[in-house]
Structure formats: C-alpha cells, structure tokens
Image (cartoon, grey):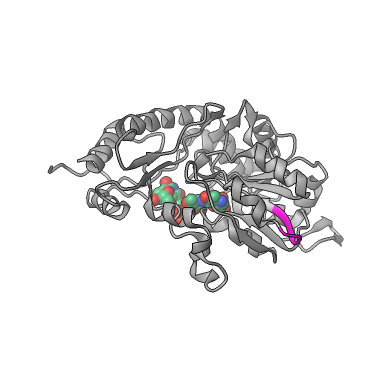
C-alpha cells in the first residue's frame, strides 16, 4: 500500500526536555556563583532527590552511566573473572575489561533476554569474583535466583540497570537488589541529565571511595589516595536532571500508552514475539523490542521497509558483544546461542513520550501488511 512518509524522520527515541524557561531559570544562580562543576549545589540537591525517587539510601552521581559502572567495579576491588551477558550495550563488557578483569559470557533466556540463571552457575570458577547482569530493555533479571547463587558462592552482584530508571519490583526500587546498580541518565533514556549516571549501593562505606575515584582519587588539597579519574557530573547536567525529574512520571505514563498500543497491534501475531510483562514489575517502557521469529518478513527486511518511510528503528543489541571486532579471537558467539539468535531477530521500535499514536499505527501497518 502506498502511504505518505511522516512529516519528519521518526527515530528510535527523542529526548524529553523540560520547559525551556524552567531550565534557564535554574542557570541564573550558576552565572551568579560561577560554580559550574566539582560537586556544586545542584549536584548535591539532585543526589538527594534521586535517593528518594529511587528508594536508595546510598547514591553517587557520575558524568555518565558508563563511568558509574566502571568505577563501581573498581571500588569493589574485584579480581579474575566477572560473569555477564553479551546481549547489551558495549559499555557493560568494556567496563569489566577496562578494570583489567576477564568477562565470562553467560547466555540470556529466550523470554525476556536477561541472564539465564539456569546456565549461570556452570560458569562460576574459583577465579569468579562478581556477576554483572543487565536489566535489558527494562526487563528485570531474576533477582531472587541471582542473589541466592551469588550468596552461595560469595560473589558480588553489580547490576547494569541503565534501562530501568524508576522501575520497581514488588514495589521495591530496582536499584536495591544486589550489592550495587548503575543507572544511565543519557539523553536517549526515559529520564536524563543530558549525559549522566548514578551508582547506587548497599554498603555505605563505598560512598567516600566512589566520591574519591570520580575526583582523581583526591582526598583533600594535599592528599591523593587512589588512582582515580574524572567522572564528575557538572552543574548543567544536574540542573537538567532536577528539571526532568518533575516530569518523569508523566513521561512514563505516555510511554505506557504507546507500548500498550504496540502490544494490541502486534501481540498474538504469528512469528512476532513480544516480551512477557511481569505483574510484579512497574515498568518504565524504555524500549519496544520486537523479535521476528519465523515471521514472513525477517528483521532486516522490516528494518529496511520502515527506513523507506523515514522511520528508523534500531537493532539494539546487534552484534552481540562477544562478536565485536575489538574482542576478536577472545570469545565466541557460539557459546551464547540464544543471545546470538535474538540479536539477529530483534528490532527496537520507536518509542518516546511525544511519539504520535498515528505513527505507532503506521509502523504496525508497515510491519503487518
Ligand atoms: N549499559 C547499557 C545497557 C546501556 O544501554 C548503556 C547506554 C550504558 C550501559 C552506558 O550508559 P551511558 O554511559 O551512555 O550513560 C545510545 C546511547 O548513547 C547510550 O546511552 C545507550 N546505552 C544506547 C543503548 O543508545 P547510540 O550510539 O545508539 O545513540 P545515538 O546517538 O544513535 O542515538 C539514538 C537515538 O536517540 C537517535 O536516533 C535519536 C535519539 N537522540 C540521540 C541523542 C544523542 C536524541 O533524541 N537526542 C540526543 O541527544 O547509543
């Protein structure tokens, strides 16, 4: 069927922005004080607000989510091997490798694409020190089984919770599971501070360690205790985060409507798989992953058909990390067959608060016709 392209390109997401005046109002005190970064007033206020929103007593802000994860792993003083999944953004494994640790890839389960807890234990060796599971697309991992396995083997659990801002499991903030979690506040996320991220953690003694590590390891003007880096969030980022936090619940509500619309149109169609919804989870609808498995058009064809209408879905996450060129010869995608298969069949469809329902219908029509 011939149809008109949308009035503007439709991308996989579009950053939400607060009213401009609200943000510029917040910039005035920065001009007055000329204090722009290095843990200023907004940085402090943002951290307090987030602790409340995320239901976590211990939180440290960072310039981005990746830095939060990398420094969390450094602060935990890990060694040897760290088990993770290859079905994620590059950041997850890079954070492990950049800490001098060896990633060991566990496959994902075929239902919600999080770590397969039935395969996890077979990968634990006497060199394993931690597990880094990913709550991919906002699907919360099997936190109970992971906790039980990690407890039995004395392993740390650090969740990559980049996709799960504001989610709860049985009413409990998702960041309260495991030893620690990392949230991303990148512009492409449900909630953002332009770039930004946070580490949340169970042990309050990690707070000064992380604070120091993000500030070059400096303890005071004349003392440097550790080999840290520059991971500080600046005041412009914190101000954006404070503004956006006022609107995030409304954004999630709008996303939910769109996700339900996609589900109504695509759910139950033969060859199209959607993630099951767990009634114990309050989702944030960060992504709209659809797996084309035995459908009459394959993933790449649908990707191209949508692109012909200037609608740009994304192949998050293809290729799998264990197939990246930078890790050539070190890992094999064949060790994680489910991840390999899903990465070839999945497409994340456009979803963001201001996406018009008519566009969602158009996307579904193109897929289904
Ligand atoms: N762990 C996981 C599981 C992650 O997914 C990520 C990040 C991290 C760790 C690391 O967190 P951060 O250090 O980034 O905080 C994007 C994001 O840059 C990245 O944050 C995100 N995951 C990843 C899944 O997606 P790209 O390379 O795909 O972004 P890009 O530039 O192609 O943008 C995607 C779409 O977003 C564009 O088509 C339009 C829209 N967009 C983009 C930008 C930059 C906007 O609307 N506004 C913007 O400013 O990585």
Residue 129 painted magenta? yes
Between 254 and 156, the one lying in front of the other is 156
- Residue at the location (43% across, 57% down)? 318
Name the residue at the left extreme.
Answer: 2
In-front residue for pair 311/154? 154
Task: Tell me if 325 is positioned left or right of 216 in this view.
Answer: left
Residue plotted at (31% across, 43% down): 271
9 and 283: which one is in front? 283
Location of the C terminus (image quadrant): top left
Residue 285 screen position, x and y as percent? 46, 35
* Percent coordinates x, y for residue 119 in the rendering: 60, 51
Q: Position of residue 3 (x, y in %)?
A: 15, 42
The magenta region covers 125-130
Q: Quadrant of residue 103?
A: bottom right
For the N terminus, the image quarter is top left
Asked whether 218 falls inside the magenta stretch, the response is: no
Q: Is residue 234 left or right of residue 213?
A: left
Is 154 drawn above or below residue 53 in the view shown? below
From this viewpoint, is residue 64 visible?
no
* 157 in relation to 243, above or below: below
Residue 267 in view (yes/no): yes
Q: Nearer the viewer, residue 144 or 121?
A: 121
Q: Position of residue 117 (x, y in %)?
A: 61, 45
């Amino acid at each position: 069927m011939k149809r008109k392209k949308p009035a503007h390109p439709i991308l996989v997401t579009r950053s939400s922005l607060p009213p401009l005046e609200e943000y510029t109002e917040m910039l005035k005190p920065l001009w007055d004080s000329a204090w722009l970064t290095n843990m200023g007033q907004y940085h402090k206020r943002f951290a307090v607000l987030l602790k409340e929103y995320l239901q976590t007593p211990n939180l440290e802000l960072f310039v981005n989510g990746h830095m939060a994860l990398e420094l969390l792993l450094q602060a935990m003083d890990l060694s040897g091997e760290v088990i993770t999944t290859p079905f994620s953004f590059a950041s997850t494994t890079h954070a492990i490798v950049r800490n001098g640790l060896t990633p060991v890839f566990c496959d994902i389960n075929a239902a919600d694409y999080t770590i397969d807890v039935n395969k996890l234990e077979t990968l634990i060796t006497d060199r394993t020190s931690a597990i880094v599971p990913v709550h991919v697309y906002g699907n919360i991992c099997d936190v109970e089984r992971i906790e039980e396995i990690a407890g039995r083997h004395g392993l740390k659990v650090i969740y990559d919770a980049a996709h799960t801002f504001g989610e709860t499991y049985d009413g409990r903030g998702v960041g309260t599971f495991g030893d620690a979690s990392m949230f991303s506040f990148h512009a492409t996320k449900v909630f953002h501070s332009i770039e930004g991220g946070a580490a949340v953690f169970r042990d309050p003694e990690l707070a000064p360690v992380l604070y120091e590590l993000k500030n070059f390891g400096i303890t005071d003007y004349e003392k440097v205790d550790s080999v840290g880096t520059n991971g500080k969030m600046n005041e412009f980022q914190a101000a954006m985060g404070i503004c956006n936090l006022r609107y995030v619940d409304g954004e999630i509500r709008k996303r939910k409507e769109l996700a339900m619309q996609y589900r109504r149109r695509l759910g139950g169609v033969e060859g199209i798989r959607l993630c099951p919804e767990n009634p114990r989870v309050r989702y944030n609808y960060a992504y709209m992953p659809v797996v084309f498995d035995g459908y009459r058009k394959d993933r790449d064809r649908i990707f191209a058909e949508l692109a012909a209408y200037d609608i740009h879905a994304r192949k998050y996450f293809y290729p799998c990390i264990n197939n990246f060129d930078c890790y050539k010869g070190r890992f094999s995608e064949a060790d994680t067959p489910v991840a390999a298969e899903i990465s070839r069949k999945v497409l994340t469809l456009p979803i963001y608060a201001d996406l018009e329902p008519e566009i969602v219908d158009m996307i579904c029509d193109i897929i289904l016709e």
